[in-house]
Image (cartoon, rainbow, N blue to C red):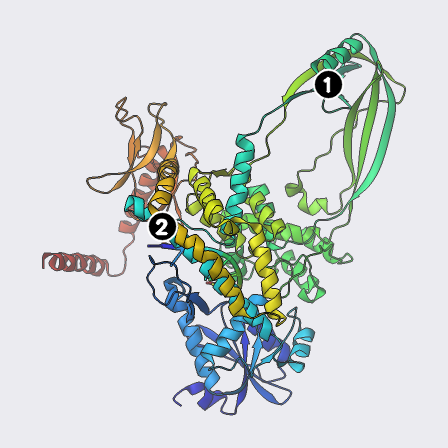
Amino acid sequence: MGYSYSAGVAADPYTLVICEKPDAAQRIADALKEDDLKQSIYGRVKTFTLTYRGRRYVICSALGHLYSIGDPSQKRHIYPVFDVEWFPTYKIDKKRSYTAQRIETIHRLAAGADSFINACDFDLEGETIGYNILKYACGEKQGNALRAKFSTLTEEELREAFQTASRGLGEGLAQAGRTRHAVDFIFGINLSRALSESYYASNKRYRVVTIGRVQGPTLSYAVQREIEIRTFVPTPFWTLTAELDKNGTVLTPEYERRRVEQLAEVKQITEACRGKTGTVSKITRSRFQQPPPTPFDIGDLQKEAYRIFGYSPSQTLKIAERLYLDALISYPRTSSQKLPPSINYLKILSGLQRNREYSREAEEISRGMLQPHEGAKTDPAHPAIYPTGELPRRALTSTEKQLYDLVVRRFLSVFGEYALREGVSATIDIAGYLFKIYGRLTLREGWLKYYRRYTGTEDRAIPDVAEGEDLPVLRVIPKEKFDQPPPRYNQSSLLEKMETEEIGTKATRADIIKTLYDRGYLAERSIVATDLAFSVVELMEKHSPRIISTDMTRRIEEHLRRIEQGEIDEEQVIQEAVDQLYESLTTIKDAEEEIGEAMTEAITKTVREMNTLGPCPTCKTGTLRVIRSKKTHKRFVGCSNYQQQRCNASAPLPQKGTLTIPGKSCSTCGWPIVYVRFGRYPWRLCINMNCPTKEKEKKEKKKEKKKENETPRKMPTMRKRSSNSRSNNNHSRSSR
DNA sequence: GCAAGGTC
């Protein structure tokens, strides 16, 4: 009653529209508005009121999931736990306390509503988000609510969706979605607790050892690759390069077979060619069109940013999100490679023209056909990633600038013309053996003009020879090579593997890889599976092999599909998960100590490696490590040669914050770098106390202080006194 | 201290 919303702005009954995110609420409001759109803000929650076809609507939004599966017992060391329940997310996750205000606002708005529309994304998770809100925040309205079904947030489609909204459209989908949450929780939480508790049983120390439906297979890909690399037996082969004299310059064609396996054959060819003259037997020229790239979906952006800048996928996602929140680029968590005209190409291009960096290119493109070269992938809720054309309202960091530039140039190039290139090959016959030399030339630059700095395609001069020309052979050089083991994954290629195996989602893959690093399963940029990773995968193979198989996701998806169709019910699927786990968990529990022991050696070794910073710059033979003092419990850096060779190299570390070791060294003094994080942004720190960069910093700080002292400040004495009184308070408190 | 999935 006391609520001003129903009492004031919208006293008449209205339809409450639930959206998945603020962005969608805005777009729906814009699409439906006739002439009386009103915006209200409650705390940080924005809602819209409007009249559409004579009916009042109040449009509000969630922030993704507002409800989560949880363990009602809240006892984290107990397993198995099979009876799980839904809770408001803020009750489970402190970091998501802001969802409390969301739920509260929706709850109040629901009180004045006489009907409801679920307008979340029409997919498994969207349906679940809407269903849970209608059920828990609106008071069991999930059965009566209408469903607005749309696949893009365009005005036309949204209006259509609201006109045809009907009851019961997504019922099966919601059941399937809720089951997905429950099954993932039951598998993940139980097996992770079983592993962690086993480690505790044999060590009496806690360590988070986790596994899950997506972590499992992803970890297993890395371990599989590690095994392939370690067991790889290289076989030798040879390549042959001829050196030919062309009026004093040397041409170097390669023997047409890129791989000669027998040394005898190598000798035979080099002998046969010795002192001979080669004849240019054939020159072929072929023109080919090189199509522009497709617009970025999040996966493509992550791969490209890794290739060009070396950013990890999770870094890229984070930077892209900041650019999105600053309205510089569109919504980044998309799987679409399409740019519909509704985003208004001309408006974006004219916006970009105001940026000196792109003005010429953007202007040029806006005069063209404006036909983007699109990819095949789509997304139900969003187009591909594009720049909005807004100018930055603050100074961007260097990483933000780089990523922004990449997004802009990619956007520009998808409107570019096909590039026209020409390949030339000359075949040279030496004593009956054929050698080839290649050249490449760009005839028409097309889209390459806009993306040049990122393509890496370079022209190679075409050898200036004519058919029938004779070229004396200087010599033929054999080179012994070895087969290479399969390459290690990096974060980009591991993410790609997850994509092709359809494990995880576009919004979570990068985070899951990061989790595997955090757990000590993966190390290095070029990914190495640690001993701990081996240990966990081996244990799971033995006790619960399904959790590390890609197949589990396929099987669950099949079950969810059948739940959606009403062929089976959710209880059946959850029961199957419980049945499968029950035996595994019992076996693990009975052997906790033994299993813990199996992990102990691996963990000790992994932890030691994780704490290794790099070679010691003082004694050159030891390694610098993060050490925790047994006496003071403080952390610092010391050399592994401290005891044997009395190497005293050491460095202090900040005691607060999370340390990460990027494996990089300071460009000034060569000592290792660490990242320290307590707030939102990590702080890059060269651990060397005597690093020249610190001298500089010290001087700059001194200068700043001097300046501060020179320019009088407002109430300097007050400042001083207040900080003094604070510390006095602390003293008196501690002395009590 | 635990999963995976949305979103800021």
Label 1 residue SS: strand
* Mark sitting earlier along the chain (2/1): 1
Q: Quadrant of the image for the N terminus of chain A? A: bottom left
**Subunit that carries the residue with mark 1:** A
Q: Quadrant of the C terminus of chain A?
A: bottom left
The residue that appears at 79% across and 12% down in the rendered structure is A473
Using the rendered view, name the quadrant where residue A596 is placed: top left
Query: Residue A638's x, y, as percent?
Result: 29, 32
Residue in view at x 35 percent, y 43 percent = A594
Q: Residue furthest right?
A: A468
Does A82 appear above or below A100?
A: above
Q: Which residue was labeled with disc 1? A: A241
The location of residue A545, given as percent across then percent down, is 51, 49
Residue A142 visible in the current orientation = yes
- Camera-side residue of A124 and A38: A124
Q: Work out which residue is located at the far top of the displayed protein and give it.
A: A275
- Expressed as whole percent of the image width and height from the top left, the position of residue A338 reads 69, 59
Identity, as a three-letter code, of the amino acid under mark 2: Asp
Residue A419 quadrant: top right
- Crowding at mark 2 (Cα within 10 Å: few <14, some 14-19, many 20+): few
Closest to the observer, A525 or A709? A525
Q: Which disc, if any, is residue A590? A: 2
